[in-house]
Amino acid sequence: MFELTCSLPLEKDLRVMLYDHDMLTKDEKIGETLIDLENRFLSKYGATCGLPQSYCVSGVNQWRDQLTPRQLLCRLCERRNLRKPVYEDDAVRFKGQRYTAADLDDKDISKRYLGPLKERLSLHILRTMGLVPEHVETRPLYSPLQPDIEQGRLMMWVDLFPKSLGPPGPPFNITPRKAKKFFLRCIIWNTSDVILDDISVTGEKMSDIYVKGWLDGHEHNKQKTDVHYRSLGGEGNFNYRFLFPFHYLPAEQLCVVDRKEHFWSIDKAETKLSPKLTIQIWDNDKFSFDDYLGHVVMDLNHMLRPAKSPEKCTLQTLDQPVDKLVSLFEQKTVKGWWPCSCEKNSEKIIAGKVEMSLEIVTEHEHEERPAGHGRDEPNMNPHLEEPHRPETSFLWFSSPYKTLKFIVWRRFKWFIVLFIILFLIFLFLGVFLYSFPNYAAMKMVGPFGPAKATQ
């Protein structure tokens, strides 16, 4: 906002210019617009200060004109030679009509902001007299080098306040809203019915499952759980917390992201995005790239209602009507099962189901009820125990004993027993065949027979 003092008609032209800022060279002029202040001041339509929709004595829409609506109406009647209005206790008579509180359209505004009824009725009559209403004007910008080509448009408004009428009301606050800091706490409890993408060395279908998540605009803060190895039925146990800090404008329902567009950019550019959470299920591979299985994207302002159990979690959960969606910013917390989908043969199928808890907390609530990332300290709100995974969940080459016990022995137990029995039988036969010729020869010759007794 610029506040200037001028003398009419000597300084009647208000020139607003737009420039392109340069770091090393001279700033370049883009365009300008010219406003005739004297024309506005002498206009019969009251162009000095636009008429608002309601007469508020406090709040963000506080009355800014130097004269009250009642004074403006009397002044307008004098200039147009009209009969002045007659004020009653709860009504105003003007031009043969009687105006009451029922004619006002400011019922949605809190009474503590509104002024007296007579002033509000006077403003209502003024708005029917063809005066300029409160508005933002869009003015074209032109350059002297190319006077016939529009260089852009400027959104603005100008208020004129004669010094003879005293000081004006407080200026309208046009300071941009500051985004508030929030934290999204996302706890991954379990997964179910995940696609089995790998085949183990024993020929069994399995997946090494982990879950990844991030907020739109915060891709640099992608987080993922630990790995549930060797899931043979698509189940995964995690008890893992994601923690996503973000800045949010509640009035606009948008997230604010400040980031540089290029690494050589000096200032950060502000981007406003919808608060969307992306959850993906992946299959971990040690010697190749991880395999993507499926995902679900949820707008936190219009979020899908979860299912209470994995059996009720189907593709229909993704096609909920608009009136069934919920806002996490209003509900604060929600828990349940959501389906993750993928494309297969041009058809959408369920790639897995994820049990999650989602909670939105403010910065102050986050300090009062702290929570750590994953299962790190402070591990509270809620406390997360180590997941109870089956004994078959391990990385095969990091645990040779478990590999022999749960993979080789469980899969080939009877083959191993049969092999040992056959090995012992063949070993016995081999020893027998090796020793039998010597034993037979010794038996036939008998070199150690009994000696005869002599006298």
Image (spheres, rainbow, N blue to C red):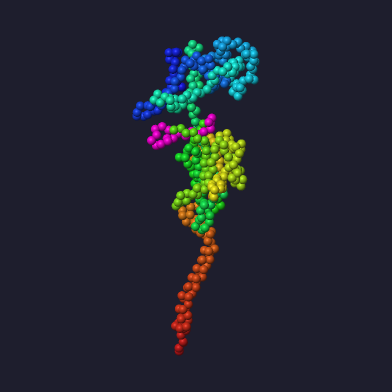
Decide whether the magenta segment is chiefly helix, strand or loop. Answer: loop
Res 455 visible: yes
Tell me where residue 347 appears, x and y as whole percent: 56, 48
Residue drawn at x 47%, y 81% is 443
Residue drawn at x 44%, y 83% is 447
Answer above or below: position of 289 versus 331.
below
Q: Is residue 237 left or right of residue 27?
A: right
Q: What is the magenta range?
A: 250-268
Tell me where residue 5 appears, x and y as whole percent: 44, 15
* Residue furthest to the left: 24
Answer above or below: position of 387 versus 155.
below
Q: Is residue 246 left or right of residue 89?
A: left
Tell me where residue 274 appears, x and y as whole percent: 52, 35
Residue drawn at x 46%, y 87% is 452
Looking at the picture, tell me which residue is in the foreground, 401 or 282: 282
Residue drawn at x 58%, y 18% is 127
Res 328 visible: no
Res 57 → quadrant: top right
Tell me where residue 106 appears, x and y as whole percent: 60, 22
Does the magenta run of residues contain 275?
no
Looking at the picture, tell me which residue is in the foreground, 320 or 434: 320
Q: How many numbered marks, from 0 up?
A: 0
Answer above or below: position of 419 versus 445.
above
Answer above or below: position of 234 versus 276.
below
Identify the image quadrant of the C terminus: bottom left
